[in-house]
Image (cartoon, helix red, strand yellow):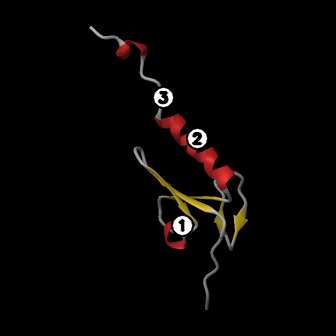
Amino acid sequence: MSSLREFQCEICGLVSENPTRWFVIECGDQKLSVIKWDLTAALSPTARHFCGEAHAQVYISRWFESICTPPPRHSLRTL
């Protein structure tokens, strides 16, 4: 008996049973890894799934925006 697995794109919600051209992104606060579709990586609890390069790029941009905010103005001064 085989197990049917479906994956859903984090951006558009597209669901696929055969996501061969998809991407997996694993990320944390300090590190982001982009992986061409790999079932083992996709099953990781920290994995996010994307139906194509464009949607992976959307997520990467959002990740950078959330991490790379400018420092407060007062921290730029030198005494």
* Cα–Cα gap, marks 3 and 1: 29 Å
- The residue drawn where x is 47% and y is 36% is 67
Q: State the residue in front, 72 or 2.
A: 72
Q: Dot 3: within a 10 Å radius of its alpha carbon, few (fewer than 14), some, or many (20 or more) residues?
A: few
Residue 5, position in %: x, y? 63, 75
- The residue drawn where x is 47% and y is 58% is 46
Q: Which amino acid does label 1 sit on?
A: Ala
Quarter of the picture containing the C terminus is: top left
Residue 69, position in %: x, y? 48, 28
Residue 69 tag number: 3
Q: Quadrant of residue 50?
A: bottom right
Q: Outermost residue toward the left?
A: 79
Q: In the image, 70: left or right of 22?
A: left
Residue 42 tag number: 1
Quarter of the picture containing the N terminus is: bottom right
Secondary element under disc 3, as helix, strand or loop, is: loop
Secondary element under disc 1, as helix, strand or loop, is: helix
Instruction: Mark 1 or mark 2: name the one nearer the start of the chain.
Output: 1
Q: Name the residue under label 2.
A: 61
Q: Outermost residue toward the bottom?
A: 1
Q: What residue type is labelled 2?
A: Ser
Q: In the image, 78: left or right of 36?
A: left
Q: Say if 67 sits above or below 34 in the image.
A: above
